[in-house]
Amino acid sequence: MINKHKTAIITGASSGIGATFAKTLAKDGWNLILTGRRTDKLTELKQRIVLLYQVSVQTFTADLSVNEDLESFLSVIDKNTTIELLINNAGFGSIDNYFKSNFLNAQQMLNVHITASTKIVHRVTPQMIENGRGAIINLASLSAFFPGPKSYYYSSTKAFMITFSECLHIDLFAKNIKVQALCPGFTNTAFHSRQGITRSKSYILKKLLWRSPQQVVNKSLKSLGKRNVICIPGFFNRLIYTSIKIMPKSLYYKLAARNSDIFFKPIDQQPISKANPLLSPQTGRSQEAVSSQEALADSQEAAVENR
């Protein structure tokens, strides 16, 4: 029987890890409040969930990097008093030259990863305290432990989310509110491919390094029940994390500098179309015509909810 007084909020819910959380929780009887940038994807997900699991699903289209959208979504939260679970999943990745890139990209990442996430936690948590129960899952990343030259803001904001989650845990543990920083590594969604990160051709490396969204979600929910604050899905990922922790920083810095391109080709090294050297082989559009703003919109449109 469905518990009509159990509601979960999921940001970045259109696809990828966010959508998988939504379907998994709905199967367990949770009512849902979902937000994302793409109305069509949210509508499709809502229809599928309602048909299969007969739970209540509210959807709200919002770009959480825009303050007006964020404030509108916060007003939706204020109207619900049965929120027991918050999943801060919205986010996007960016791999570029920090000194040559448009700062707008960095500012929007700060808005989504830090400002929006912390504002939502700030709005939801008092209600959880009053109800005497609740849980918060903040999407961080394995890359939070691996600072690199082409991931200034992504790694840094994800590291912030880990520390922020630990602070929340210390403060809220006695109030029966569980907190988790979920740190997935490579996941089979469009999030990584949009950044030029391709899966290894090796079957063994695929099994060791890559996880499906369902595997990530299952590990997260299982760890949440055990009150594990930092959750790293995948044994090999946890092994890498442990190895880095004991490695001297000076050695790590040298290795990171020499191997920063090991998993991807930076955009400025992508091959040029032979037919027309000014055309991108992926899009056929003039490389000079693709402004930094357009590139940002393209990457965010598919990546914000595809983690």
Image (cartoon, grey):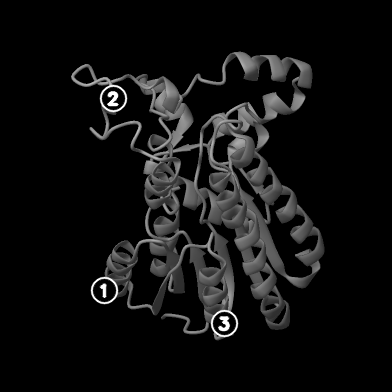
Say what secondary structure mark 1 lies in: helix
Q: Residue at x 52, y 84 (%)?
A: 5
On the image, the x and y values in percent for residue 282 come to 27, 31
Q: Of the residues under marks 3 and 1, which one precedes in the sequence?
A: 1
Q: Pick the residue in front: 293 or 30.
A: 293
Compared to residue 239, the image places residue 305 above or below, namely below
Q: Is residue 189 visible?
A: no
Q: Pick the residue in front: 204 or 184.
A: 184
Separation of marks 1 and 2 at Cα, in angstroms? 48 Å
Q: Of the residues under marks 2 and 3, which one precedes in the sequence?
A: 3
Q: Is residue 181 visible?
A: yes
Residue assigned mark 2? 278
On the image, the x and y values in percent for residue 128 come to 67, 76
Q: Residue at x 65, y 46 (%)?
A: 157
The quarter of the rendered structure image containing the N terminus is: bottom left
Residue assigned mark 1? 51
Crowding at label 3, few (<14), some or many (≥20) Cα neighbours within 10 Å? some
Separation of marks 3 and 1 at Cα, in angstroms? 22 Å
Say what secondary structure mark 3 lies in: loop
- Give residue 167's quadrant in the image: bottom right
Q: Pick the residue in front: 189 or 96.
A: 96
